[in-house]
Each structure stands twice: as structure tokens, then as C-alpha cells.
Amino acid sequence: MEPLLPAAKRPGRSSRWTKRQLVDGIRWRVRVGAPWRGVPKCYGSWQAVYGLFRGWQRSGVWERIVGGLQAAQIWLG
């Protein structure tokens, strides 16, 4: 899945949470169906998790990820 993720846009101070933590937080929230404020702290703050989700939603990243994974599934059979 990593090749489908967008590259970091700006240099500078590193994030307090890793992209992995934030994506896992998004996955947890979607799987459980909890409100954004219910995302456990181990995934980062709920604001950071939601911010990444919403930013990627607006820029079409999720569509590219789903399309890329679907295309890979076709080839993997």
C-alpha cells in the first residue's frame, strides 16, 4: 500500500505521530464505527486522525488507494 500513499509535502519538524499510527486510527474508527472523538490515543489525537482522513478525502487519495488495491487484486487473482 505504501506506493499508493502521497509523499510528504513539506520539510521541517516531524509529526508527533507516524503516518502508520494515523492510518491505523482511521482504520480503527471505520471498523468500529465510533465517533472521531472516540479514537484511542495510541493512534494519535482524534483531530490529527480526522485531519489526515479529511485531507486525503478532499484530495482524492482514498480513491487512488482503493483503485490501486483493486487493480492489484485483479493481477493477484
Image: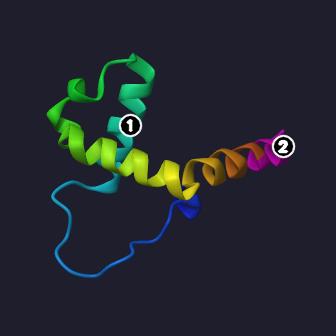
Q: Nearer the viewer, residue 56 or 69?
A: 56
- Seen in the picture, residue 57 relative to 28 is either above or below; the reply is below
Q: Is residue 76 magenta?
A: yes
- The amino acid on which the numbered mark 1 sits, given as a three-letter code, is Ile
- The answer to whether residue 17 is left or right of residue 19 is left
Instruction: Specify the farthest residue to the front.
Output: 58
Query: What residue is pinned by disc 1?
Result: 26
- The answer to whether residue 63 is left or right of residue 58 is right
Q: Cα distance, mark 1 to mark 2? A: 25 Å
The local crowd at label 1, few if under 14, some if 14 to 19, many if 20 or more residues have their Cα within 10 Å, is some
Q: In the rendering, at what x and y percent does residue 12 appear?
A: 21, 80
Q: Residue at x 76, y 42 (%)?
A: 73
Q: Residue at x 44, y 26 (%)?
A: 30
Query: What residue is pinned by disc 2?
Result: 74
Q: Residue at x 84, y 38 (%)?
A: 77
Q: Is residue 23 magenta?
A: no
Q: In the rendering, at what x and y percent does residue 43 appear?
A: 24, 39
Question: Which stretch appears magenta?
Answer: 71-77
Q: Residue at x 59, y 59 (%)?
A: 4
